Amino acid sequence: MSKTEFPPSITSRPVYGELEARSGSGHLMIADAEGAEAILDLAESADKDFWAKAHVIYIPKKTGTKYSSQLEELGAGQYYAGPSYEAAQSRIRRALQDCHMGTQVYLSGTESLMGQAMAEATAAGIPHTAIQTEHRGSTARRMQCVHCKGITEDVTTDPFECSHCGLSLFVRDHYSRRLAAFQGVRVDAEDPGNIPEKVELFK
Amino acid sequence: MTIQFNDETFHGDFTFKNSDWAIKRFPFPFHEDSYMYSVNMEPHTSYRPGSVFERTFDVDEHYVSEMKDRARVLANDPLRCQSLPHMTLAGWDLVELIMEAKAREYPDLFELHKDGNRWRWINKPLGIDDTFTFLDESTLPYGPMEYITRQTQGDFAVLDQRDDNLWMDAGMVTTQADWSLDFDIGMNFFEWHAPVPKAHEMGIFVRALKFLLNIQQGQPARRLNWTMTVNPLLDTSPENYHKWGVMKQGLTMENIGEKQHLRVELQTFFRLPRSNALVFPIRCYLIRFEDLVTVPKWARRLHRVIRDLPEELATYKGFIDNRPLMVEYLSQFDDGSPTSDGIWPDDD
Amino acid sequence: MSAGTAKLNVTVAEVKPINDLVTRFKFVRTGGGDLPTFSGGAHTVVEMQDGDITRLNAYSLMSNPADRGAYTISVRRDDQGRGGSKFMHNKVKEGMEMVISNPVNLFSLDLRAKKHLMLAGGIGITPFMAQMHQLSMMGGNFELHYSVRTASLGTYAKELAERYPGKVHIYHDDQKEAIDLKTLLANQPLGTHVYVCGPKGMINWVHSTAGEMGWPREAVHSEEFLAPASGKPFEVKCAVSNKIVQVGEHQSLLEALEAAGIDAPYLCRGGACGQCETNVIGYDGKFLHYDHWLTDEQKAGGKHIMPCVSRFEGKTLVLDR
């Protein structure tokens, strides 16, 4: 099962829901890996004419072809599967240019994918509260090092090493929507060299 | 009164020092012998001549050196000053608010001459004499918010008001108590306060937000907040935490009086007229323990507050490890006699 | 903080009838000097000394916010109303000194918007006039759709069409013209915000149509000041001030509190700003909640009332005032 129950946290930490088909002039759906399951679940309740106005952008990552043929068979007006978020980014921006007010945005999969796609959609003018999200799959985090500002993807342990400056950082729940990242702060700042054992917190 | 500006540093050799005048007017934040969060807002009206509450934007002996420190921090990290594109108008509102207030309240230090939208601004302590066109960014060397806050003590958070919330969409933040503008920019009121323990559960932020949303033009408000800092560091940013965090080590009974500082924020809130934004200046005042204990009432009270503070708050404020030493040091100055209500020294 | 907002002493510089229903008033600072600048969409609360009664009505500022020399408002005469607009039309003359509040904005522009789509009905045009001044100065992208009863009652319609060519669309009810809202809302670029000010029915129509078409709630803005409803007189006990106050048929609870010398803060006096929210200590009867502020849950809970517009019917009401 790809669903995760997140423990209650601080108010900046995003809370995810369950995707539901909503009325709108178009439907932009962006998912990665197990996020496909959220779209397939939504498909069970969506009207037939929903898909004609839908644009599905899917990044399978490690799931390979497990979901892609099912997604393609939904019959979306546009369907795209790509190798990475970075590869899909210019397509996402272009798709948002075509949207009008009333377009619904659906994001599902990892926090990294949803966060980055949400930043694109809000920059295009959609309030973040109007964007639906559903978490599926990996709970690995996208972290920003508060010291060097570099982003480290797929963080699974606390502490972890910044992939840019190499400092050992502890993982906070404080989250920036603008950066689509959690905050990482040097764990041994007050006592250099005293770095606790890594614990695998995220999978 | 003419202010004698200190030549001092807030990093490296830390030559920052409060004069007797500055000690006497220090905004001691505890009105009773214990501390807990509250929405301790009051109108920001002129109060007690000579105190930090007298003027709209207090200018003191640290002004010139604080502005040098800000320039140094910005040169090292320009991300400390950011403004999202829709906040430029609020920046101009702030230019007007500060220039008009300083020229009115410190005519010997600042002058503002207006000829329609053509404004001439003279800042004598910093040696600035600029003429520019109000609302025309191309006539200033920086964006309007950055221009004026490079000349005004304290951090500035400029908050957009929409959807019944406040959004931190611009700011100048170089003298902060461990929070990052670069990380928090764009967040709403509840989000940027997310890391604060306990206060959410107490409903503090819901009440504070309701109050702030209703602040009106011409009716600013203020409150005090506080924390602790080892060495007179204005820039205790998360960005540089790996550089200053280590300074918390090595406090002893011999050096704590000199190194440990009470850090007080005078927070004020103004509605900005053109943008309907809210500006939230956060002015930082530092005082070393050995100067603070020269006021007997403050010494007794600080001892009791620090001793009895809930552990969560001491942890959040970053001095849980040093608390026993602080309490030991301060206890020397607490004979157990009662303290009077309010924040002011008794001999006043 | 004392009740209301900071006050401005002003002198009426001009009273100009615009059409059969609407009169425009221009205020300058008494004794000269600049008025505070403001943001488009702001209102001021005008104090009217009508014999023994002090009336306080909120009116949108319609002048250019950058013009600090004078404020202008337009008042539509409401013959069925409680008397504020009639006082303005009949009693206010040039040269008269009045007291108004500092500007307060409960209908501000979302300055992030890539486009501002304004929908006005009747006298609801006034806040948009200040907003259009502001946006045209800032190079903002806006479009106005303005619905009027007839050309002769189309307050400022002609001059707006001339001032902002291509941006202003007028619809005349008597010529069976109407805003084609569905088409209009279907084609707006992302980042558009829609603003509506006008009769209640129009506001509800815009909110519900936009919602059905998938518009985010945050992109739809409205302003409607409610006039306090008249109703059966009632009695209220104020626990803090230890007073018993009678609320008259044509008086609001807030007005009755003020008349009894009880401090109650306010900004809009129209059920929108939340400032006058008052805790209920006890009651035996039923509330008539008319405000936009309290949630349905709060309204059902019987613990809060907005004295500016809401009323009470029953035996006893005890307030925390």
Image (cartoon, coloured by chain):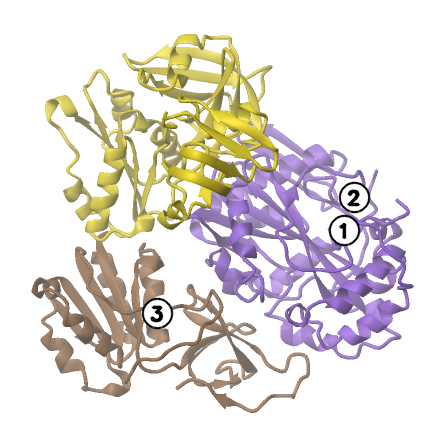
Chain colours: A brown, B purple, C yellow
Q: Eyeballing the image, is C305 above or below B251?
A: above
Task: Tell me the amino acid under the disc marked 3.
Answer: Tyr
Q: Position of residue A80 (x, y in %)?
A: 18, 74
Marks 2 and 1 on same chain: yes
Q: Chain of mark 1?
A: B
Question: Viewer-proximal residue, A82 or A102?
Answer: A102
Q: Earlier in the sequence, mark 2 or mark 1?
A: 1
SS under mark 3? loop
Q: Secondary structure at mark 1?
A: loop
User: Dot 2, crowdedness within 10 Å: few (<14), some or many (≥20)?
Assistant: some
CA gap, disc 3 and disc 1: 44 Å
Name which residue lies at 20% across and 45% down: C209
| Above or below, comparing residue C118 to residue C87 in the picture | below
Query: How many neighbours does mark 3 have within 10 angstroms: few (below 14), some (14-19), or many (20 or more)?
Result: some
Query: Which of C209/B237 is in front?
Result: C209
**Residue at left offset 28%, top offset 73%:** A108
Q: CA distance from mark 2 to mark 1?
A: 8 Å
**Badge 1 amino acid:** Pro
Asked whether the beta carbons under mark 2 and mark 1 sit within 8 Å of each other, the answer is yes
In which quadrant of the rendered image does the C terminus of chain C lie? top right
Chain letter, disc 2 residue: B
In-image side of C182 versus A155 (left or right)? left
Location of mark 3 (residue): A16
What residue is at 56 percent from the left and 34 percent from the top? C238
User: For the residues marked 2 and 3, what is the alpha-carbon distance in whole angstroms?
Assistant: 49 Å
Outermost residue on the bottom side: it is A197
Q: Position of residue A190 (x, y in %)?
A: 68, 79
Quadrant where the N terminus of chain C is found in the figure: top right
From this view, report whether residue A88 is shown above or below residue B4: below
Q: Which residue is mark 1?
A: B27
